[in-house]
Each structure stands twice: as C-alpha cells, then as structure tokens.
C-alpha cells in the first residue's frame, strides 16, 4: 500500500494460479467452460487484479515488456467460479463413491515400501469422510507399531498405529490365522505387517476394522520387543518422563499429535508465502552480526578450549563468529533486490533461561516485503496466522480432538476465533491506558508495573487478549527505547513503527516493524544504542543504493505450535529440545 498498487508478471504456461488478498482475487485456469485460456509457452503474462465479483474476463493489448504476452484482466469471481464449476463437473463424470475412495487410497498410499510389498497408510482409511466405510470388502495391507494385544477365547484383538494419524486401527485375528502365535507373544512397541479384509466394525468409536482369517495372508512380525524393558507400556506417562526418552517419545500420543500439527503448520507456512509470490531464502546460521543487539549468542570457533598456548590462535572466519539469533538482517538484503522474500530456519540464543517458553535452539519464520509499510506488515501477519489456524482446523481433526480432551479444552474454540475474527488493533499508548484503567478500578493487579515507556509483560498481554478485547490483538507504535535499532522512527520522534500480535493463551506470537530506510536516521539510532556503524556497513549500504520502504516480522515457530495445540511447555513441541543443561539425543 505504500505505492498504491502494482502489477505482477507471472510466467506463461501455468496450469492454474490463484492469489487472493482480502477483497482482491486473480485466477488463471487452463480452461473455462471448454474455452482455453493459455499463453504461448515461455511467454510472460501481465496480470492485473480487478475487484472480486466483477463479471467480465477481457484481454488487453500485448505489452512490449511481456515479449509477446497478453494483458489479461481476469475477474476474480468469474474466473475462480468457472474453475470450480469445471472441477465439480469432472468429478460428477467419474465413478461412484466407492471407486473414488479406492482410488484415493491407492494414490495416497506410501510409494516407497517395497520392503513389505506395499502398504496403505492408516490415515487414508480412518480419516476418510465416511470413516472408511466405502472401502469395506477391500483387501488392504497396513504396517505399524502395536499399541495393545488383547487375546480372548476364539479371537485376538490388536490395535496398531503407523504415525499417519492419531487414531488406531483395530485388527481382529481369528483363531488359526497366520501369525497369530507370533503376535500373541508380543505387545506394545512391536512392529508388524497386517494383510486382511476391511470389514464393518461392531466396536464403539470406529467404522471399520481389518479381519484376518485362517485363509488369508495374516500377520507378520517385523520387529519384536522385550515387554519387560520397553519403557512405553500401555499407561499414561508424564511429559517430564517422556523428555528423558526423546528417541521413543514420538510414539506417545501427545508428541505424535504435536509432530503432525507441526508438519501441517510448516507446509501451511510455505503454501501461504509461495502462493503470494514470496521467494524462499536460506539465510546463514553462522554470522558476525547480532540482529537483536542483546549479545546473547553462541560463539563459533574451531579452537580448542582456551589456554595460554592457543590464546592468540587466529579466528577461523577472521573475526569472532556466532550462531545467529535471527535471519532478518540477512534476508533484508534479498528483499531489497528481489522483492517479497521469507526465511524459515533454526536460530539460537545463549540465554540461561529454563522457563516453559524459552529454548536455546528454535525455528523462526521471517518474511520481508519491499515497498511495504507497517499497515501492510500487520495485514500480512494477520492473514498468515488466520491461514495457519484454518489449515490446522481443516487437516488435524483427530489430533485436535485429543488436545481438546487431554491438554487444553479451549484449543479448538481458540483456533476458530483466530481463523474467523478480525484482529483488534490498538496503539501501545492506548493499550497502556486500558491497562491503567483496570488497575485503577481494582479489577486487575499485576506483578509488573504498567507505565508508558515500559515493555508490556506476558500478564499484560494476556489481559488485553483474554479480558479486555477477548480476541487476538495487534499492539503497534511502541516507544523507540523498547525496540531494536532498525525499526522506523515515527514522526513524533518518540515511537517506532513496530507491532506485536498477542494471542489468547500465549501472549506475544509475532513481532514486526517497518524498517528504517533513511540512512541518517538509522545512523542516529545505531549511535544512540552504542552499535558500530563499521560492523553493519553492508546493512547501511542498502540505505545508500536504492533504498525502499520495506517491512517484515518474525514468528517463533514453536510458539505457533503451542498456540495450535494447547501444549504448555515449548520443550514438547520441538523434536529434540535444547535448553540449559540439555543437548542430548
């Protein structure tokens, strides 16, 4: 919005592309009602968005810079609606529901499983819209780890999970079935291959189960387990105990569910930015720059532990180097050349904190947008969070049901609120006044002081989101002394164009700002904060050679997973947590 608007050049020959920004929409489809819309291969196409809902598709004159391409003005509502109608018509011409379900299972089954002769993921059966009923009568092969073995007089019940879904698939093994003797000697933790017929289940809470009869291939034990030594018996384990067996804890319900949600959020992140034309940039892990200016960084050296003998040993990189605390400064270089970019990778902080909200190694998502201001930054961050919430609600149903039942009963409602309700926006100054009002009235009593110029603490942030506004809240225009040197100074000379997004249950989830693009102002801020201009010479160069307004934000990925699962300790939403005193596994 800092420029008003601009066009995007999209490569020709694309089968389909859709980009939606609030009330704007653009779509390119291979055919609409049988009429091809396709530029010549290799040509550029100028695409201009028109307000969604306009009922026209027109073509303009070719532009020279398009090298023969056409300027298409695609009405969002018409193009997208036509594409959706075409897909619906195609589906209706296919076979019945049973055939569609069978093909869905076949197409989404694991492709790399020749060691067991092929298999179907349990999620493709149980997560189907009908719970797998349309597959009844089919012969299927599943592989996974045993959860329970329960033997009765004429039948043995085995529950198996392969990690693809929270749900377990029940296997009914009849007397005389192949592999019955072997599986009866095993228990939780053993790995097996099961081949049988999918039948209707009479048990509560499941639609289908696999029946293994004496005539069928039956069960094959792939990996045995010592029942007395296996630490994950069929009982509820404390989360603290699970951290001591991080190599096995992915088999537990809570870590398995958190891992699947983490995966969905990672994919949703890339989908969101890629669909909007952002370029994914790999920023360095080893750096000589301190983005936050806090000095809490891990030193990187090839030297032995310091002694008098090697005290003068030359630095491997020629100067002191550290593990990065942020990729922001690096990705800004690419933003100022390639436009909209983002980085998503590990970052590190040598902060001696053992709280439930801090890690020494964590992942950060950091987009950076050229030609953008603080409003654009807030809009993008809000769109991203709502996209993530919608995606988790859509794709992680069984896992969310578990979290709601066992971890946080409000997690699903919180995600629905995040996905559906526009965020509240309030300046820092107004937020402080709101908090001071509840203190004065006696409605609230905080541990930390609320005063203009002081940072908002978690207790203040949660009060704003959970009591005052009862929704996700963006606080912006913070005092300059509370924020980093690179944030753009506002005209009042007291505040910077910075924003934090506060969510119910977790407090701050996103921090961002418009960056200072004026060299003289940047130099003044660096001098005031005691930072060396020589060390940031390359960062200052961006302000000397074609400086542009730009903005970005950072989001701690683990905190996003906590928000979407209700898990209270950050150590339980990352595969192998690193914190003071622990770097095992």
Image: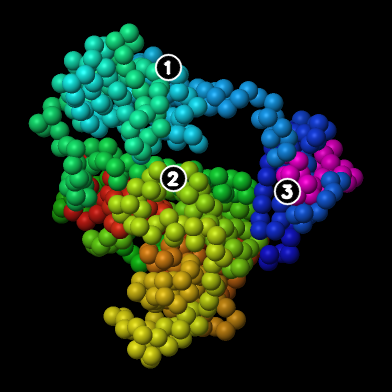
Q: Looking at the image, tell me whether mark 2 or mark 1 is earlier in sequence order.
A: 1
Tell me what residue is drawn at x 63 percent, y 23 percent: 95
From the viewer's side, name the closer residue of 467 and 276. Answer: 467
- 563 relative to 101, above or below: below
Write down the residue under mark 1: 139
Magenta stretch: includes residue 463: no
Where's residue 278, x and y in %? 60, 49
Assign the C terminus to one quadrant of the image: top left
**515 with respect to 305 (left or right):** right
Write down the residue under mark 2: 397
**44 with respect to 289 (left or right):** right
* Residue contact between numbered discs 3 and 1, judged by CB atoms under 8 Å: no
Write down the residue under mark 3: 26
Where's residue 266, x and y in %? 46, 45
Classify residue 162 by image quadrant: top left
Counting other residues with Cα less than 10 Å from the Cα at mark 1, is it few (<14), some (14-19), or many (20 or more)?
A: some
């Amino acid at each position: 919005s800092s420029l008003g608007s601009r066009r995007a050049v999209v490569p020709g020959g694309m089968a389909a592309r859709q980009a939606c920004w609030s009330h704007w929409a653009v779509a390119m489809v291979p055919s609409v009602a049988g009429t091809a819309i396709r530029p010549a291969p290799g040509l550029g196409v100028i695409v201009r968005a028109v307000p969604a809902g306009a009922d026209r598709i027109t073509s303009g004159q070719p532009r020279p810079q398009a090298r023969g391409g056409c300027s298409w003005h695609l009405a969002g509502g018409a193009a997208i609606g036509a594409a959706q109608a075409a897909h619906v018509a195609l589906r209706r011409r296919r076979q019945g529901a049973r055939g569609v379900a069978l093909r869905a299972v076949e197409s989404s089954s694991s492709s790399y499983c020749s060691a067991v002769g092929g298999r179907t993921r349990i999620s493709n059966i149980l997560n189907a819209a009908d719970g797998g009923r349309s597959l009844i009568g089919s012969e299927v092969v599943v592989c996974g780890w045993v959860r329970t073995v329960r033997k009765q007089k004429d039948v043995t019940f085995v529950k198996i999970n392969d990690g693809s879904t929270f749900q377990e698939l029940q296997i009914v093994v009849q007397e005389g079935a192949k592999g019955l003797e072997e599986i009866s000697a095993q228990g939780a933790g053993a790995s097996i291959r099961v081949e049988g017929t999918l039948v209707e289940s009479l048990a509560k809470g499941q639609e289908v189960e696999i029946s293994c009869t004496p005539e069928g291939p039956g069960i094959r034990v792939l990996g045995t387990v010592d029942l007395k030594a296996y630490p994950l018996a069929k009982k509820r384990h404390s989360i603290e105990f699970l951290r001591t067996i991080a190599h096995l804890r992915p088999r537990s319900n809570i870590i398995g569910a958190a891992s699947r949600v983490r995966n969905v959020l990672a994919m949703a992140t890339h989908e969101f930015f890629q669909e909007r034309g952002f370029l994914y940039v790999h920023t360095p892990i080893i750096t000589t720059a301190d983005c936050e200016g806090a000095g809490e960084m891990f030193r990187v050296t090839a030297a032995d532990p310091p002694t008098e003998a090697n005290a003068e040993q030359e630095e491997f990189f020629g100067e002191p180097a550290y593990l990065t605390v942020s990729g922001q400064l690096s990705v800004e270089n690419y933003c100022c050349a390639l436009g909209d970019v983002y980085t998503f990778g590990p970052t590190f902080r040598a902060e001696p904190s053992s709280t439930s909200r801090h890690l020494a190694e964590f992942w950060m998502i950091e987009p950076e947008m050229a030609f953008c201001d603080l409003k654009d930054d807030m809009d993008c961050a809000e769109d991203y969070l709502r996209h993530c919430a919608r995606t988790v609600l859509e794709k992680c149903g069984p896992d969310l049901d578990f979290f709601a039942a066992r971890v946080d009963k409000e997690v699903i409602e919180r995600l629905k609120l995040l996905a559906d309700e526009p965020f509240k926006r309030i300046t820092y100054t107004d937020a402080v006044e709101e908090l001071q009002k509840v203190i004065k009235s006696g409605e609230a009593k905080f541990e930390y002081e609320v005063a203009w110029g002081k940072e908002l603490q978690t207790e203040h942030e949660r009060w704003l989101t959970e009591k005052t506004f009862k929704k996700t809240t963006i606080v912006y225009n913070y005092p300059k002394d509370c924020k980093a040197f690179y944030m753009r100074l506002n005209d009042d000379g007291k505040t910077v164009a910075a924003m934090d997004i506060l969510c119910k249950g977790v407090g701050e989830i996103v921090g961002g700002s418009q960056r200072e693009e004026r060299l003289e102002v940047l130099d003044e801020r660096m001098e005031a904060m005691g930072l060396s201009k020589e060390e940031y010479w390359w960062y200052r160069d961006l302000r000397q050679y074609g400086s542009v307004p730009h903005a970005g934000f950072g989001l701690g990925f683990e905190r996003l997973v906590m928000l979407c699962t209700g898990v209270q300790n950050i150590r339980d939403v990352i595969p192998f947590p690193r914190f003071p005193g622990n770097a095992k596994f």
